[in-house]
Amino acid sequence: MSPHGLGCSLALWPVNASPERGHGESPLHKLFQAEPVGRGKYSRLSAKSERVWNSIRERLCSARSASRLSQEAFASRLGVSARSLRDWEKGYDLPALGRLIAWARLLGFRLIVVASEGVLGDPGENVVEGESYEKSELRRLVAPLRIRRRQRSLSQTDMGLLLGVDRVTLASWERASHSPTVENLLAYVGRVRCRLDLEPIEP
């Protein structure tokens, strides 16, 4: 049956237009551009995310060396194999987010989200009594990302499309009920025009 038999019609729209907005750019047009893929060891990361990650891992590697702990000794404290730590430090692989949070903590650092106006979020915010350190850190990291997403008028579905996940998955990250991968976190932070960094944990 043809579309006309159903009382419908077909129409073509330019890829950068929407029926509601005419022939101008859609809200996601600029954000939905494919970011350049990293040319280094992380083919899954954009070039920008790769630079951010390399900065973080190099700082952690330098801090571990400055502490005079061998890879074997530090890996034992972290609860991973020396090979895993070596692969992370050399840039051969990415740790799980929980491992990254613990890695940074053992060296006296925490992950932060940085925007042009400075560090976003407060270490004392969104703390739930009895919650694990990893969970509270995840909650602290995703809180400003959720706010920035809303400020950019992006729904969870919109952001999910940009990150290659569905709305349910994104919602679980923003509730801190599930952890994104380091790759996903770097991408989300970049999409809201921020960057991931480290800061020393105050005694």
Image: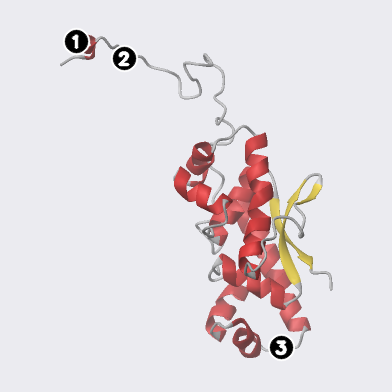
Between disc 1 and disc 3, whose residue precedes? Answer: 1
Q: Name the residue at 58% across, 79% down.
A: 85
Report whether residue 51 is seen: no
- Residue 69's tag is 3
Q: Callout 3: few (<14), some (14-19), or many (20+) C-alpha neighbours within 10 Å?
A: few
Which image quarter: residue 57?
A: bottom right
In front of the other: label 2 or label 1? Answer: 1
How far apart in space, not on screen, are marks 1 and 3 (Cα)?
Answer: 75 Å
Q: Could you tell me which secondary element the residue under label 2 belongs to? A: loop
How far apart in space, not on screen, are marks 3 and 2 (Cα)?
Answer: 67 Å
Rendering coords of residue 16 (x, y %): 50, 24
Which three-letter amino acid code belongs to the residue tagged 2?
A: Leu
Q: Name the residue at 48% across, 40% down.
A: 161
Rendering coords of residue 188 (x, y %): 59, 49
Pick out the residue farthest to the left: 1
Which three-letter amino acid code belongs to the residue tagged 3?
A: Leu
Q: Which residue is mark 1?
A: 5
Q: Name the residue at 23% across, 9% down.
A: 4
> Do tag 1 and tag 3 residues touch (Cβ < 8 Å)?
no
Rendering coords of residue 24 (x, y %): 56, 18
Q: Callout 2: few (<14), some (14-19), or many (20+) C-alpha neighbours within 10 Å?
A: few
Q: Up-down: is 82 above or below 44?
A: below
Residue closest to the eye, 76 or 169: 169
Q: Which residue is mark 2?
A: 10
Q: Quadrant of the N terminus?
A: top left
Which three-letter amino acid code belongs to the residue tagged 1?
A: Gly
